[in-house]
Image (spheres, rainbow, N blue to C red):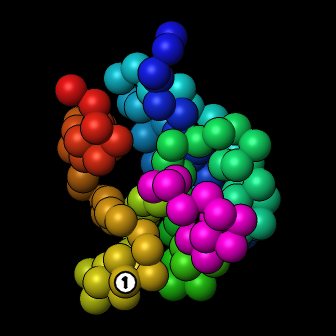
Amino acid sequence: MPGRHRIVIAKPGLDGHDRGAKIVARALRDAGFEVIYTGLHQTPEQIVETAIQEDADAVGLSLHSGAHMTLFPKVVRGLRERGATEIVVFGGGIIPKEDVPKLKEAGVEAIFTPGTSTEEIVAWLRERLGEA
């Protein structure tokens, strides 16, 4: 389908909890996005490579292990270093409220914590990517 946005959903680090990522991936696919789910235990470098290879419009990171302050910014930096500045990065998982402003400063555009509806994520992504 021409113009369909491609979204990479990734689980950086050693976090083995993928239920939330799979729910978001399915919701995005059901909403008409093309979704590439990378699976568990991806390094930031692997995620960056996948996003570039797949010509992604956005990367959604999911993390429950507490390493979000290291891994999320590494993905953003990796994309910038590779010249992929147009790829939108968003995240979700168990992320303390006080970390959200720091992550946004690091280039993660939105953080969705437990209790966020998939409709809210879909709506944000559609608006951010300029869909009607």
Image point (28%, 31%), residue name:
131
Residue 12, located in which quarter of the rendered image? bottom right
User: Where 2 sits versus 114, above or below?
Assistant: above
Give the residue type at disc 1: Glu
Residue 60 vs residue 13: left or right? left
Q: Position of residue 124 (x, y in %)?
A: 25, 46
Rendered location of residue 32, percent (x, y): 40, 20
Which quarter of the figure has residue 46? Answer: bottom right
Q: Is residue 59 visible?
A: yes
Q: Secondary structure at mark 1?
A: helix
Residue sitting at 54 percent across and 62 percent down?
85
Where residue 113 sits in the image (x, y, percent)? 31, 63
Instruction: Report the side of 80 relative to 109 (left or right).
Output: right
Up-down relation of residue 61 to residue 33 (above or below): below
Magenta stretch encompasses residue 77: yes
Q: Above or below — where is 37 with respect to 86?
A: above
Q: Which residue is drawn at the image coordinates 50% and 55% (left, top)?
A: 86
Q: Residues within 10 Å of mark 1 (few under 14, many from 20)?
A: few
In percent of width and height, residue 2 lies at: 49, 14
Looking at the rendering, the stretch of residues picked out in magenta corresponds to 76-88
According to the picture, the residue beneath numbered tag 1 turns out to be 105
Q: Residue at x 66, y 49 (%)?
A: 51
Q: Say which quadrant the C terminus sits in.
A: top left
Does any portion of residue 121 appear in the rendered image? no
Question: How many labels, in total?
Answer: 1
Q: Is residue 65 magenta?
A: no
